[in-house]
């Protein structure tokens, strides 16, 4: 039972082959960061043109390398929402066409649902999915604490009211002139800095809810930079990065701590691009040890956008009889019935 996954919701073109039990046979990604770097962010039109050029040859090569015939696949899952519309169109049209020509089922998957199940991917041994579990989804566009009760049954405990955690790191990176993509750059720079050098706010930390707000942090960084009114030397940048990242991480970890205590969840997953952050990973593992909670964080290659997570989430849905319709429309936003908007 092998499933093909296609992920083109943003700038990465990604394809994967995954077994129905979450074992990944292969996961490939092509990013043309060089097209976006000069602009400090992703240019949607460029991203969709890149998908158009790259996607079909990548699928072709993937199947050839694994001696898999398209018609032997158990299904095709494709990200159909949320994301950049032009990019999603390329993926969904490709999936529908392949589904028709190979006579295999396909399904459109919510990108965030893909992230949620990325924690259960494995390159070797199948891992048993456990329900319920608590999940913190931290990506470039989302920061959500969600109780995952079953496939398709999700209770959002809290989410960001403005910027996502990844967005806060990306914007800060642009502010100090480090540019795009910000998260990994701040992660590396922060290792050389003093996290106590500058005081950044911990937004909504003490509020008795699970919501987040990160836009004030960026504003605080902008004020600090204006006050300094000088060119930043490398050590100042590193100290600022360490202090800023610590503020983001502390809020995420403390809200998670409260949610774990209050829900009594015994299993916790940290997913989405920001789950690649080394400080966040370390502090979440430590929190799990403290509370006796099993923590699952994807391997680094499955934290940021990838097609293996889409293949797996789609496989779970196809296996319980759900099928995509040929009139499936890609959408920039989630659907009303999805758990995340
Ligand atoms: O999940 P993802 O690849 O794409 C979205 O669905 O948004 O997440 C991208 C986000 C970006 O904001 C990026 O800066 C952040 O993940 N990111 C990181 C790291 N690697 C990627 N943030 C912090 N530390 C990292 N090592
Ligand atoms: Zn993502």
Image (cartoon, helix red, strand yellow):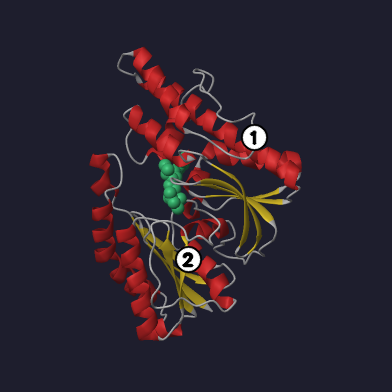
- Mark 1 lies on a secondary structure that is helix
N-term mark: 2 or 1: 2
Q: CA distance from mark 2 to mark 1?
A: 31 Å
Q: Residue at x 37, y 76 (%)?
A: 96
Q: Is 127 left or right of 72, judged from the image as shown?
A: right
Residue at the image position 54 percent from the left and 58 percent from the top? 118
Horizontal side of 55 relative to 296 (left or right) equals left
- The tag on residue 109 is 2
Question: Where does the N terminus fall, quadrant-wise?
Answer: bottom right
Residue 301 versus residue 196: which sits nearer the camera? 196
* Crowd rating for badge 2 (residues with CA inside 10 Å; few <14, some 14–19, many 20+): many
Residue 15 or residue 67, whichever sits in front:
15
Residue at numbered disc 1: 254
Q: Is mark 1 within 8 Å of ligand 1?
A: no
Q: Is residue 75 above or below residue 330?
A: below
Tag 1: Cα neighbours inside 10 Å, few (<14), some, or many (≥20)?
A: some
Residue 61, compared with residue 289, is above or below; it is below
Which residue is at the front of the view, 218 or 29? 218
Image quarter for residue 208? top right
Please tell me which residue is depicted at 47% across the width and 28% down the height of the picture: 217
In the figure, is residue 228 to the left or right of 23? left
Q: What secondary structure is marked by label 2?
A: strand
């Amino acid at each position: 039972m092998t499933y093909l996954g296609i992920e083109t919701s943003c700038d990465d073109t990604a394809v994967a082959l995954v077994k129905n039990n979450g074992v990944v046979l292969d996961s490939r990604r092509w990013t043309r960061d060089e097209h976006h770097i000069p602009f400090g962010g992703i240019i949607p039109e460029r991203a969709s043109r890149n998908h158009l050029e790259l996607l079909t040859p990548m699928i072709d090569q993937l199947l050839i390398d694994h001696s898999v015939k398209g018609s032997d696949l158990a299904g095709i899952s494709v990200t159909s929402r949320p994301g950049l519309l032009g990019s999603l169109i390329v993926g969904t049209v490709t999936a529908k066409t392949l589904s028709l020509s190979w006579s295999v089922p396909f399904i459109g998957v919510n990108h965030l649902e893909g992230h949620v199940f990325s924690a259960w991917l494995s390159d070797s041994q199948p891992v048993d999915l456990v329900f319920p579990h608590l999940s913190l989804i931290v990506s470039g566009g989302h920061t959500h604490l969600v109780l995952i009760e079953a496939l398709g049954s999700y209770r959002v405990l809290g989410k960001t009211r403005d910027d996502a955690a990844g967005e806060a790191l990306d914007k800060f990176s642009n502010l100090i002139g480090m540019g795009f993509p910000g998260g990994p750059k701040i992660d590396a720079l922060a290792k050389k800095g003093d996290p106590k050098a500058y005081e950044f706010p911990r937004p909504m930390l003490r509020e008795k809810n699970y919501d987040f707000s990160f836009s004030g942090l960026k504003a605080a960084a902008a004020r600090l930079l204006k006050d300094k009114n000088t060119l930043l030397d490398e050590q100042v940048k590193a100290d600022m990065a360490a202090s800023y990242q610590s503020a983001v991480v502390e809020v995420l970890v403390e809200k998670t701590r409260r949610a774990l205590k209050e829900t009594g969840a015994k299993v916790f997953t940290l997913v989405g691009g920001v789950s690649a952050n080394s400080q966040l990973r370390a502090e979440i593992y430590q929190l799990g040890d403290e509370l006796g909670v099993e923590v699952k964080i994807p391997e680094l290659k499955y934290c940021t956008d990838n097609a293996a997570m889409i293949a797996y989430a789609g496989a779970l849905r196809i296996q319980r009889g759900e099928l995509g319709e040929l009139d499936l429309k890609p959408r920039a936003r989630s659907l009303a019935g999805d758990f995340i908007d």
